[in-house]
Image (tube, rainbow, N blue to C red):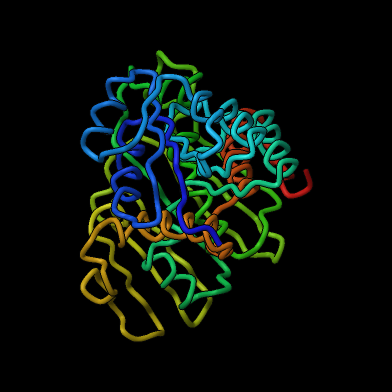
Amino acid sequence: MKDQISVAIFGCGNMGSTHARKLAKMNNVRLRYLVDVNEESAIRLKKELDAELTSSDYRTALDDKEVDIVIICTHHHLHAPMSIASAQAGKHIFCEKPLALTMEDCLAITEAVEKAGVKFMMGFQARFSPFVLKLKEVVPHPWVIIAQLIDPKWGESIWANDPIEGGGNVLSQGCHCFDVTCFLSGSKPVSIYAEGGNFHHPSLPIIDSVACTLRFENGSVANVTVGDFGNPALMGKSAYQVFAGSVTATLFKYYNEPEVRLWGKEPSRITIDDLPGCNDSHIAHGYTQQIQALIDWVSKDIDPVNAAKVRDGMLATELALKAFESIKTHQPQSVISDQC
């Protein structure tokens, strides 16, 4: 048990600020450090939230013995060096998605975390969403999963589309979809076959569209479609369907006003008005519960059973990368993360 948890946040943009604002409202949390390469961003957030210290160098926070947890919300290419250095400094880690952009970096992070024995949580907040958990409750062992995470075209010049800093939509954001699909399955993926390509980012060396099939260890299958090739007018950007013969469940418009429809189970419709607290979008999407689970894990050693941990993060990245390889070779690819 630890009464007070000191936190350092690396990256004070959108997600870093979101997490900082939630942490600032928690009685047992100190915002010890706000770190950003543009220190003015950290200083502005410090003034808003009455945080303690700022820096432009994350190593300053790692040298501070009072810091218990680091929360990494930077461009994706920095996740590996920051996570490895944090683990070596004995800090617990929360890392926004994706874990990293290469398997080499994912393996290096995993090795550092497991060697140091620190706690590590991925920023896959959908695992805490009451709507995703409702699907898992109603259909705990699906035979078939259909999943999508589809955006309108991302700009050519945004950092998340940069092949070095962000990896493009499928790696940068699609990892969410791969992770939720594995979470809903409850089984380990063993192979993936994908088709797709670069449909409308000709100036960038990325794959922007993936349609793939996953096979799981228990024999179940999933269809996963991700990319930035349009706006799904009916289902919304993010949607999941789970099927088990006599019972099916569909979650649609997850990033808007999520709703679940059931077949073979009552009630047939579940909206934000039917689940406690879900008129707050951060609760509906799982952000609030995720951060609370992180603090409870470090302060009270309560294992967050729904959370994505370091190997879950590695698996999500592997699935995206193996989808790319399958598209290039037109061959199914074996999934090996769990064997590493």
Q: Report if residue 208 is visible in the image.
A: yes
Residue at 72% x, 44% y: name it: 114
Judged left or right of residue 183, residue 26 is left
In front: 215, or 110?
110
Q: Quadrant of residue 73?
A: top left
**Residue 172 at x, y = what percent?**
45, 34
Residue at x 67% of width, y 58% of height? 188
Closer-to-camera residue (258/289): 289
- On the image, the x and y values in percent for residue 251 come to 36, 64
* Quarter of the image that includes the C terminus: top right
The N terminus lies in quadrant: bottom right
Apparent side of residue 10 relative to residue 338 in the rendered image (left or right):
left
x, y (%) of residue 234?
A: 25, 55
Locate residue 16, reporting x and y percent: 36, 37
Q: Nearer the viewer, residue 331 or 152?
A: 152
Based on the displayed image, in which of its 4 quarters is residue 99 positioned?
top right
Decide: is 245 above or below 156: below
Residue at figure coordinates x 47%, y 67% from the top left: 242
**Residue 113 drawn above or below residue 184:** above
Say which residue appears at 25% left-offset and 77% top-offset: 274
Between 157 and 72, the one lying in front of the other is: 72
Q: How many marks?
A: 0
